[in-house]
Structure formats: structure tokens, C-alpha cells
Amino acid sequence: MTPPSSGQPQDLSGWLSYLESIHPASIDMGLDRIRLVYERLDLDLHRSQVITVAGTNGKGTTCAMIEQGLMQAGQTTAVYSSPHLLDYRERVRVNHQLLSAQSHCDAFSRVEKARGDITLTYFEFGTLAALVLMAEAKPDYLILEVGLGGRLDAVNIIDADIAVITTIGLDHQEYLGTDREQIGVEKAGILRHNKVAVIGEPHPPVALIDVVKHMTTQAYWQGTSFRYQLQADAFVWQSDSGLEITSRVPHIPAPNAATALKVLELTEHLSALDVDLLFEQVRVPGRCQLLSRKPDVLVDVAHNTQAVSYLCEQLRLRHWRKLHLVVGMLKDKDIEGCLNLLRPFEPNWYLADLEGPRAASATTLASYLHENDNISTFDNVKSALAGAKAAADEDDLILVFGSFVTLAAVLEPEHDG
């Protein structure tokens, strides 16, 4: 690629600021604009098998396990996922490695030249740049994580050879619909006629089942085509093909691991894998991640009721005396629903302001709790965490959750000077 031309941003930070400025909306549903720019880019992705992963929760962990399994089998991979936690470069991995900032800048430059006067959102621009980088890598497998929904998400300009739907819950209702039936149809938008799908949602809405039948998609369903059991210290997975695997319990949620294993079976690489090693290797930052001990500090990106319900299950499996919750959330989420799920634990609440136009204030979060709840408010997440640490005994548990922005604030390394 040629370097960015004169007048274009000269570093990654400059490009990201530029991407934020060129479209009036952060989300602009529809594929016509991005598809036209994609055609202008004339990328060659034909040598790669495409696995597209949609779902309300579990997309990142499922992508990570598919990626690691394929690499263990000797395949080359490129993964596109979002959002990132600390570094924009996290959004594109080639053979599990991040690319240089200059590589991203060069890809942005190429997209900028191709788009002309066509408007692109931050996510659309970044998706096209990721596809540029993936096309250059020429991997055996492309793994694309859907950002929002499925049918109208930017990654859906690429046809999936294997479409994966992890879970279907309530999130982004203003864009995707007000119930699981409507949201299921949006997720099903990544399916293709006469192609393969793996559905990890154990209770699929009827509308999703109908779409699968209409499209004559070869679908494999969790609970029938494949299933798993969690025993005291083992994970048992069975496929309708007759294959059975008993291994250690994965670090990621078991339903996502089960779904990823079915995808790996369909790629014809599962039988050659050391699944114990695979489960040990796959740990995804920000998903039930233990930062420190005495007291235990756990962080999780959970930001909708389905994810917080899973988080509650994990809390019940741990041993602690008192729970301290450090919370920062976006105002377009179901704040009340998420917080109500955690109220039965009778925690101490440390509510934090977040930055940005979508952020909910600590005062707003507090308005969804009760007067007799033990509430403290802070103007940033780091101060809230410091308050929790000051109050907690060594056998207590501190949980930081609510959004990627919340976790970025506590995971970001301190800089001297």
C-alpha cells in the first residue's frame, strides 16, 4: 500500500478522530453505502472460508475459541471483533497477533480514497479497513463478529460459509426490535440460502426457526444437534455425529464453548484438537477476569440483562463475605433490569459517571436503586474502584461491570508523568 496522501491523518489517533467526525450519526442502519465502497475496493477474499458470529452475548468468546482451535489445527486465521478495550488494534487479529498502527493507517487511507463522497460511520469505515487488512493476510479462515444485530450490520456485506448465532436476548431494542422474536429475525440476517448455521441459543424464538426453514439453511441447534453437560470438574460435549468429548471446564461460558466446538467440527478440524489445551488457552479479557486478590477484584463487560444473569450465576459459585459493585453504564441500556438482578446480593454500590454522550451519570444509576441500598457515587470509575477497595475486607468480592468503557478505565495501565 502507498502511505497516506498529503492532507490525510498521519497517525492512528488522527485517523480515529477523523472517523468520528465524518458522519453525523454513530449508527446508520443499512448496507447500501458500505456495499458500494466495498465494491470499489475490489478485495479478494475468495480463498478464505468465512465464519460470521452474531448474538446478543457470547460473540467475542465464541470467536476466540474458534480462532484458537483453528490455529491449533494448523490453519491461518484473521478475526475482526468489536468494540476494543484499550487499543483500537485489538479489533483485527491475524494469527492471533495485532497489526501495526501503520498497517491500520494504510488501510484507512485506502478506504478513504475509495469512498469518495459516500458517508460512512466510524464502525462502517473500520469494518472496511479490517477487510482490507484481512484480504492482504489471505488467511484460511475469516472470523467476523457482528457489531449490532446481523441483517443490517456492516460485516453482513460478506457472505458467511458458516453463520453462528450465540444467544438472543434484549439489547439495542431501538434498532433491533422490542422482543426476542423481532431480534431473532435481525440476527438471522447473517444466514445464507443453502449454507450452514450453528445456533447456540438453547431457546430459539419461533421467528428464527421459521427463517431457517425458509432459507433451507442446514442448521445445527444447541440442545439437539449438539449438547453439553457440566459435571463437578469436567465438561462433556456430544454431537449428533456421534462424537463425544470430555475435558476440563472452559474459562469461557460453557454454552459458548459448546457452540464453538460444533463450528470446529463442521470445519473438520475438531477431531485433531487437544480440547483440554484449547480450553486452557482461551481466556478473553474483560469476561469474568480476576484482576487481583484479597479482596478479589473481578471485572466483566456485562451490560444487558442476559449477560448480568450469567454474571449472577458466577457470583453464586464464588465464596465471598460481602459484595461491592462498581458500576458504570450507558443510558441506552436496561439499567433498571441489570441492577435489579444484583440487588438480592445486598451489595454495597459504587456508582460512577462515564464519559461520552451515551453515558449515564452516577446519579441516574442511583435513581434506579432504593433509598435503603448502600449507595456511593463517584465522578469516575477509578475513584469508585478506589472507594470499594478502601471499604472491602480481604475476604470480600469487588465486581466492576456495566460496559466496555467502564472496564477500560480500570484496565488501562497507569502512565508516569
Image (cartoon, rainbow, N blue to C red):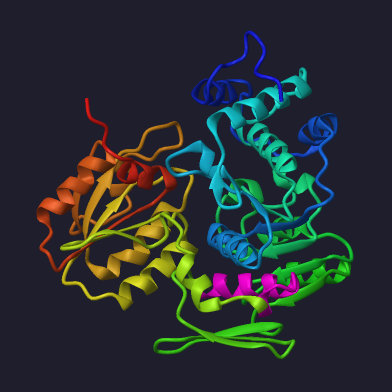
The outermost residue toward the front is 74
- Give percent across and percent down for residue 247: 50, 84
Q: Nearer the viewer, residue 143 or 218?
A: 143
| 136 in relation to 116, above or below | below
Q: Main secondary structure of the magenta part?
A: helix
Q: Is residue 264 magenta?
A: yes
Which quadrant of the figure has residue 291?
bottom left
| 5 in relation to 198, above or below | above
Q: Nearer the viewer, residue 363 or 213?
A: 213
Which quadrant of the figure has residue 33?
top right
- Position of 413 with respect to 117 (left or right) is left
- Give percent across and percent down for residue 288: 38, 63
Q: Is residue 242 magenta?
A: no
Tell me the residue at 20%/41% (across/down).
383
Q: Which residues are magenta?
A: 254-271
Q: Which quadrant is the C terminus positioned in?
A: top left
Q: Specify whether residue 78 is in view.
A: yes
Tell me the residue at 55%/34% (across/down).
100
Q: Nearer the viewer, residue 253 or 142?
A: 142
- Position of 51 with respect to 352 (left or right) is right
- Position of 35 with respect to 251 (left or right) is right
Q: Which quadrant is the N terminus positioned in?
A: top right
| 328 in relation to 217, above or below | above
| 395 in relation to 134, above or below | below
Tell me the residue at 72%/27% (across/down).
111
Q: Specify whether residue 145 is in view.
A: no
- Give percent across and percent down for residue 170: 56, 59
